[in-house]
Structure formats: C-alpha cells, structure tokens
C-alpha cells in the first residue's frame, strides 16, 4: 500500500495527524504508520505513542511517558504539550480503574506548569508504569466514539 499523503508531510505533527486518522479508516495501516512515527523527536513521537496506547499497545506507553521529561512553557506548542500529558494521565487513570489497581496519582493542575521538577514527575510516572504494566489493561472508551465520529 502507498503511504497516504499526510503521512509524508514535512511537518511531523501533520504526519502523525494523518496516521491517527488513517487508523480510524484502515486500522492496521494506520497503526503501522504510528509505530514508525514513535521515533520522531519530542511531542509528535509522544502523540504517535499515545495514539497506539489508546488502541491497547502497551509497548508504546514508555515512549508516550517521555512527554513528562520536559515542561510545557506558555506557547501554543506548550498547550499541546500539556494536553498530551493530560491525555496520557487520563488513559492511565481509566485503565487503572478498570484494571482494579492503584491510580497513577500526582494529578494536579500545577504540575503541568512545574518545569523545575519535570525529572521527578517523569520518574514518578515511569516507576508507576513499571510496577503496574503487567496487571494493567489499557482502556480508552473515548476511542470507540472517536472511531465512530472520526475525531481524535
């Protein structure tokens, strides 16, 4: 199969967006594209990994958690960065609840603006994931709605 046009775009965010939407239309090809895109630096790669995790791919969670290594700043890009962090926590929280294991914790609005302690925040969530991943079933009920309406 030829790679869809958006998946070949110069902008890595556009490439990931194309792969996300492709996964709604042609799931296996979209997931293949997303797997390739987890290697993109920064937020585009984290977004690709989060998208895979939403489909239940546990192997992508460690890459998605990388978004906690850095703070967000006050820019528009910082808003997207904070949104990725929040979506990862929502996925992990809902998955923990349905898997009957402890919540990830440390959830506060201030943490998304705490650039000075990002290393500790990252390590906290990485340790939580390492302790719980075997017992956790990834679950994202909103994905079903997204697939039906083609909205991420």
Image (tube, rainbow, N blue to C red):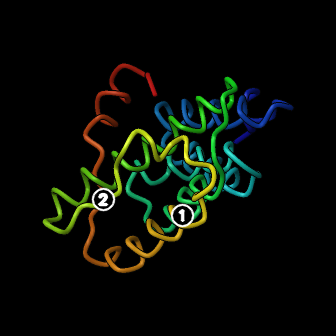
Q: Nearer the viewer, residue 41 or 20?
A: 41
Which quadrant does the N terminus fall into?
top right
Q: Quadrant of residue 13?
A: top right
| 57 to the left or right of 143 | right
| 139 to the left or right of 48 | left
118 over 34 or under it: above or below: below
Q: Which residue is mark 1?
A: 122
**Image point 62% across, 37% down: which residue?**
19
Report the Cα–Cα distance between label 2 and label 1. Answer: 12 Å
Q: Which mark is drawn over residue 105?
A: 2
The total number of labels drawn is 2
**Image point 59% across, 62% down: which residue?**
63
| 125 to the left or right of 122 | left
Going from N to C along the chain, the mark reached first, 2 or 1, is 2
**Outermost residue to the top:** 149
**Image point 15% across, 57% down: which residue?**
98
Q: Nearer the viewer, residue 147 or 87?
A: 87
125 over 47 or under it: above or below: below
């Amino acid at each position: 199969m030829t790679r869809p046009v958006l998946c070949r775009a110069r902008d890595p965010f556009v490439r990931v967006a194309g792969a996300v939407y492709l996964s709604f239309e042609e799931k296996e090809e979209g997931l293949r594209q997303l797997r390739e895109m987890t290697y993109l630096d920064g937020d585009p790669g984290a977004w690709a990994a989060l998208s895979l995790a939403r489909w239940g791919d546990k192997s992508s969670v460690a890459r998605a958690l990388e978004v906690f290594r850095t703070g967000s700043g006050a820019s528009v890009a910082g808003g997207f960065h904070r949104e990725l962090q929040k979506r990862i926590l929502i996925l992990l929280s809902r998955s923990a609840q349905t898997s009957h294991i402890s919540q990830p914790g440390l959830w506060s609005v201030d943490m998304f603006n705490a650039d000075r302690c990002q290393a500790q925040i990252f390590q906290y969530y990485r340790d939580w994931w390492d302790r719980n991943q075997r017992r956790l079933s990834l679950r994202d009920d909103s994905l079903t709605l997204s697939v039906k309406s083609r909205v991420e």
